[in-house]
Image: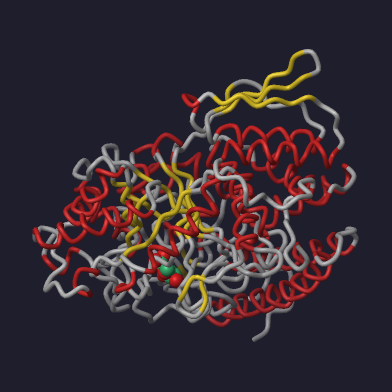
Amino acid sequence: MSGWRDCRGWQRALTREPSSECKTPEEMALFELQNYLAASGCGRQVGIKTDPSMDESFQISESDGGVLIRGGRRGVLYGVYALIEALELGESLPKGVRTPCYPLRMIDCWDNMDGTIERGYAGRSIWFEDDAFCYEPDRIRRLGRMLAGAGINVLCINNVNVHMPAQQLPGSLLADTAALADLLRPFGVRLMISIDFSLPLQFGLESADPLDLRVSDFWSHLAQNVWHAIPDMAGFLVKADSEHRPGPNAYGRTHAEGANMLAKALKPFGGVLVWRAFVYNCMQDWRDTDTDRPCAAYDLYQPLDGMFDDNVILQVKYGPYDFQVREPVSPLLVGMNNTRMGMELQLAQEYTGQQIDIFAMPPMWRRLFDEMGKEKVSAVAAVSNLGRDDNWTGHPFAMLNLYAYGRFAWDPDTDPETVIRRWSALTYGFEKDLTDRLTSLLMESGRVYELYTAPLGLNWMINPENHYGANPYGYEFMVWGTYTKADRNGVGIDRTAKGTGYVSQYPPQIRHKYEDPQTCPDEYLLFFHRLNYDFVMKDGRTLLQRIYDDHFTGYELAEQMAETLDKMPFPEPDAGVIKERMEKQLENARQWRDVTNTFFYRFSGAADAKGRKIYS
Ligand code: GCV
């Protein structure tokens, strides 16, 4: 166990490793319960009763001092973890039948078979190395415990940018994937794999055209092999016609035709085909002002609404760009009424601090679910923030995001503050006032990061190569469609009907809020509007002054965070990691503040109204 700590408090209460003897979630539920009762000495009589019709649901009831957990085959395991969590927090036991809102609660890992992780910030892959599977089974079982404890039930194990020795897929690769699936099955976690749309070409076919019968036969045959080896495989995940990945467009076919062909191959086995909607022109000429990247996905997919098979899930990133600090919810997520939709979140802090800067995501997710409406999607996915680092997530606080994601996936009405408080209390077990302080620091952390990096919807002012660090013009003349168009008069893109028209992709009640700078929330102002620096904001400040103020405030708040954390008695090794990363965060925040303020000062020539130092 040494060097591989579990980060969730109640999991520390499980002193025994998850047993290799348990083959089903029911067996694991019993094991975990006995494990907890023995270690905690809580002395309660707890029974488990399986009712297969309840599937993932559970109900905990108390009578005469005894507790009964009734649930489906997977439900009883969730019930045991819920019981342990409540007891560890000293809370009353959950009431009523608990059922997850979304049947598919996925983690998408961007792990490559060479052991690297695309946009990974917590070390190397937990299961790949040297182009092969390579892991300690115990570690995988601990992962299973952690995922099940958070309520997550699908793990996609490889990068959507597929780098797999395809030839081995029906052979050794499949056997190894099956072995991994065996280890995670007792935790109710099923596997998914990302597949390459052009795979048939790698097996000697001349085409990957989805309407070619030889191609659909190829996929049906492959699906048969896969489900023969792993009967409970969840499905396939596909990134097609996106950032140079192959797809149906090469054959003049639509994305519905491409997705449905694959979905039909999976259908006999109950598999789902998750088709990502991250499609845009990634070779844009910055001189082309007619193309506005955020419009791309809606323009492509909305006309296809109703044309996807019922085992296709169209998986859409939460915003129309790409996991930026502040984006409005994607219009595709609100505008597809006849398609099974999934929302893709990102735990990996690609644009949100790279697990150096603290960024607790629950407030952001609250906003996204509120903007979208939880019933608009039937699945959720999140890009993983896990890696082989001893604490799984690099920064210990990044574990909060994984835990909270699972809670939102069960219940999208989750209150951000409550989930943060619970995680803080479970993980560190501080006295109430310290837990309160940590909770409010985490609640504010995303906003602080936003203030010193990208306030007012000013996205993409970062280094293009690693997506980190201040670089206001970093993306300005690139091919990615990511422009802020700052000049001496103003900044931002006009996305109203007079501009690119993006705002028209929203239904009227949302559109009306955003299309007028007077009603548009400040946080989205420069996402939707191009404004002059002397534009007067709702609070009476000019836009330029607000840009300066936000950057100054962001840095000051980061300093206060550092002071607060310094006084908290975190145990080692967390204490050391938190301190070292906070120092880096402060250094970075200072750089972001000064580079961005200087950038706008040089363009505008206007000094800070409060006389603070802006470098010339
Ligand atoms: C997996 C962005 C990231 C890529 C990622 C891509 C995607 O472009 O920078 O690393 O590729 O999104 O989500 O497909």
Instruction: Report if residue 286 is visible in the image.
Output: yes
Question: Looking at the rendering, in which quadrant would you find the C terminus?
Answer: bottom right
| Residue in front for this viewpoint, 64 or 601 | 64
Position of residue 541 in the picture relative to residue 63 (left or right): left
Extreme-front residue of the structure: 21
For residue 611, which quarter of the picture?
bottom right
**What residue is shown at x 44% (from left), y 49% (from top)?**
329
Q: Position of residue 445 (x, y in %)?
A: 69, 57
For residue 419, which quarter of the picture?
top right
**What residue is shown at x 77% (from left), y 40% (from top)?**
36
Q: Position of residue 524 (x, y in %)?
A: 49, 54
Position of residue 99 in the picture relative to residue 66 (left or right): left
| Residue in front for this viewpoint, 191 or 323 | 191
Q: Position of residue 447 (x, y in %)?
A: 65, 56
| Ligand 1: quadrant of the figure | bottom left
Question: Looking at the rendering, in which quadrant would you find the N terminus?
Answer: bottom right
Marker count (numbered): 0
Q: Position of residue 52 (x, y in %)?
A: 49, 27
The colouring scheme, among rainbow, by chain, secondary structure or one colour, is secondary structure
For residue 350, which quarter of the picture?
bottom right
Position of residue 234 in the picture relative to residue 607 (left or right): left
**What residue is shown at x 42% (from left), y 59% (from top)?**
529
| Residue in front for this viewpoint, 383 or 522 | 383
Vertical relation: 510 (above or below) 591: above
| Residue in front for this viewpoint, 377 or 221 | 221
**What residue is shown at x 10% (from left), y 62% (from top)?**
214
Instruction: Report if residue 515 is visible in the image.
Output: no
Position of residue 360 in the picture relative to residue 99 (left or right): right
Extreme-top residue of the structure: 64
Vertical relation: 370 (above or below) 385: above
